Amino acid sequence: MAVNLLEYDLEGLAAFCAGLGEKRFRAVQLFRWIHQKGEADITRMTDLARSLREQLPGVAEVRALPVISEHVSADGTIKWLFDVGGGNAVETVFIPEEDRGTLCVSSQAGCAVGCRFCSTGAQGFSRNLSCAEITAQLWFAEHRLRQRLSLPAGTRAVDNVVMMGMGEPLQNYAALLPALRTMLDDHGYGLSRRRVTVSTSGVVPMIDRLRDDCPVALAVSLHAPNDALRDELVPLNRKYPLRELLAACERYLDKAPRDFITFEYCMLDGVNDTPALAHELVRLVQGRAGAPAVACKLNLIPFNPFPASGLKRSPRERVLAFAQVLQDAGIVTTVRKTRGEDIDAACGQLAGEVQDRTNARERLARKPVRIPLVAAGASGR
C-alpha cells in the first residue's frame, strides 16, 4: 500500500523525500500543498518538479479518513464520525466561537483509562490511532470548513485544537508527537503552542516527555481533591497518585507556553461537588495538602449523563457554589458552557464505534461508584 503522507511531520517528510533522491525544499513544498492548501491530488501540486509528481503517485498518497456521518447542532457545533477500519469509528467535534474555532480531536479508538463519567471509556478500547489518522481529522475539518464558510485565502477555520476527543493522548505518544509538530509547523497549520492543548488523565512519565519534546498547553483531568475519591473516578490515579501528578504539573510549567495548568473537574451530583470537597481542592492546588502548589485554572464541567454510568449531573446552584469557594480563594475558575449536547458532542459524550478488547461494558456494569467517607466531607470549613 502507498504511504499516507499525512503520517509525517516535516522532518519525517524530508526523510521520506530524501529516500527518493529529493532535497529538503521539495518536502517543504509538498508539506505546504498538503496542509496549507488541502490538496490531496499530487498531480495538481504544480510547483513540484515533474519527475517528483510522476514518481510520488506510485509510492505515496494523501489518504483522508472516510466520513460516516456529519451532525450539526442547533448551536453550530459540528460532529463528524470517521471510519478508521476494523469496525472502529472515531468522533471529531468543531466548536465555533466568536473569537476562535476549536477542533476536538481523537487519539484512540476507545480509551483504556476507564474514567467513570466518560462514555468513551465505557465503550472500551480497540487501538491507538496512527499519526495520519490524528492529523487527518484536522486536515479534513480545516479544509472542509474553509469551503463551507467561504473563507478568504490564508484565513484559518480552526485556530484552536484540543486533544480532548476519544482516547488518552499520552498513551499514544509516538503518534501524538508528530501530529502536534504538524499542527505547530509554520509550513503546516501554524498554530500557536498556546492554542494546542493536550488533555491527560495523568500519565506522569509522559507529561515529563511532552514538556521536553513539544510543550503545548496542558489540561489535566482532575475530578477529585483526594486519592480515595480519584481512585474511584479516574482509575489511573492508583498508578500515578495526586502527589506525583501535581509534581509533574509543576515541572511542566518550567517550559509550558502558558503560565498555568488547566484542571478539568466534572461535577457529579453527590459525589465530588460538596463545599467540603471544594475547600479540600483549594488546599490541594495551593500546596497545603502535602502536594506542590500549582499555578492553575479550574474548569468545572457539567456532567453529560449516559445510561451505563449510574451518575447524575450536579444541580447548577451547587456548581456555582463550588465555583464560588474556589474563586474566593483566588483561583481562576470557569464553568464550561455545554456545547453540542443535542448531537452527543459535548464533553464526555464522544463514543464513536469501538470493537472493545477490554470488556469495559461488563466491568462498568459490575462496579458501581463507591463514595469514600473522606469524600463525604468531614474536612472543610
Image (cartoon, helix red, strand yellow):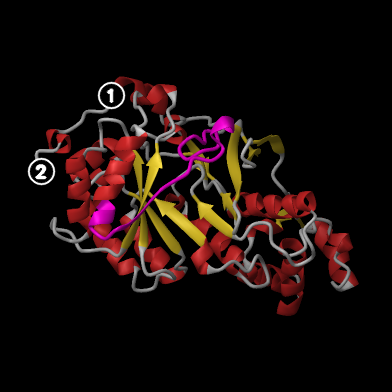
Q: Residue furthest left?
A: 378
Element class at badge 1: loop
Q: Residues within 10 Å of mark 2 (few under 14, many from 20)?
A: few
In this rendering, would 80 be left or right of 252? right
**Is residue 236 something that shows in the picture?**
no
Of the numbered discs in the image, which one, if any, rests on residue 368? 1
In-front residue for pair 35/261: 261
Residue type pointed to by label 2: Ser
Location of residue 104 in the rendering, given as x and y in whole percent from the top left corner:
55, 48
217 over 109 or under it: above or below:
below
**Is residue 377 something that shows in the picture?**
yes
Of the numbered discs in the image, which one, if any, rests on residue 379? 2
Most common SS among magenta residues: loop
In this rendering, would 380 be left or right of 212? left
Which residue is depicted at the point 79% across and 63% down?
Answer: 152
Location of residue 216 in the rendering, given as x and y in whole percent from the top left corner:
46, 65
Report if residue 50 lies within the magenta region: no
In-front residue for pair 97/224: 97
Q: CA distance from mark 2 to mark 1?
A: 24 Å
In-front residue for pair 333/64: 333
For the record, the magenta segment spans 326-351
Element class at badge 2: loop
Which residue is depicted at the point 20% across and 31% down?
Answer: 371
Q: Residues within 10 Å of mark 1 (few under 14, many from 20)?
A: some
Residue type pointed to by label 1: Pro
